[in-house]
Image (cartoon, rainbow, N blue to C red):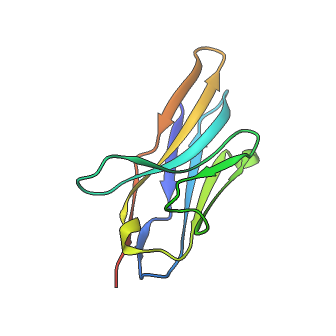
Amino acid sequence: QVQLVESGGGLVQPGGSLRLSCTASGSGFSIGAMGWYRQAPGKERESVAAIAGSDLTTYAESTKGRFTISRDNAKNTAYLQMNSLKPEDTAVYYCNAHIFRISYGEREYWGQGTQVTVSS
């Protein structure tokens, strides 16, 4: 069984920074694209940033220039460095990964979510 475990959320003042981590645990799998999504109260879940297996990255317009997604394949971990945070970035952030296993091909996994609150 593969699990995605997130960490790094918390409370930060406007203009501050946080780094989120997402590690895939388990064995016998490989990871394709990974991404970060967020969901604010009363809103739909939205994509924040994604990184392909080739390391090609994409960002939501609202996070370009402020957020950076990266990955360490040796550690099965993706990161989201968030700078210049704004109150509107407040949300639960979820990690997403496309996992490949011989037994079932490709499946999409989600982390449990980590709260990010930007407030003075």
- Name, please, the residue furthest toward the front: 61
Left or right of 56? Residue 17 is: left
| x and y percentages locating residue 27 in the rendered image | 64, 31
The residue depicted at 63 percent of the width and 38 percent of the height is: 33
| x and y percentages locating residue 58 in the rendered image | 62, 49
Foreground residue among 54 and 29: 54
Q: Quadrant of residue 66?
A: bottom right
Looking at the rendered structure, the number of numbered marks drawn on it comes to: 0
The residue depicted at 72 percent of the width and 46 percent of the height is: 56
Give the vertical position of 3 relative to 83 (above or below): above
- Name, please, the residue furthest toward the top: 103
| x and y percentages locating residue 19 in the rendered image | 56, 67
Foreground residue among 59 and 27: 59
Q: Quadrant of residue 118?
A: bottom left
| x and y percentages locating residue 54 in the rendered image | 76, 40
Give the vertical position of 38 relative to 14 (above or below): above
Foreground residue among 76 and 119: 119
Give the vertical position of 57 relative to 97 (above or below): below
- Name, please, the residue furthest toward the left: 42
The residue depicted at 23 percent of the width and 53 percent of the height is: 42
The residue depicted at 72 percent of the width and 38 percent of the height is: 53
Q: Quadrant of residue 81?
A: bottom right
Give the vertical position of 120 relative to 5 (above or below): below
Left or right of 18? Residue 57 is: right
Left or right of 103? Residue 118 is: left
Left or right of 10? Residue 95 is: right
Pick the quarter of the image with the C terminus.
bottom left
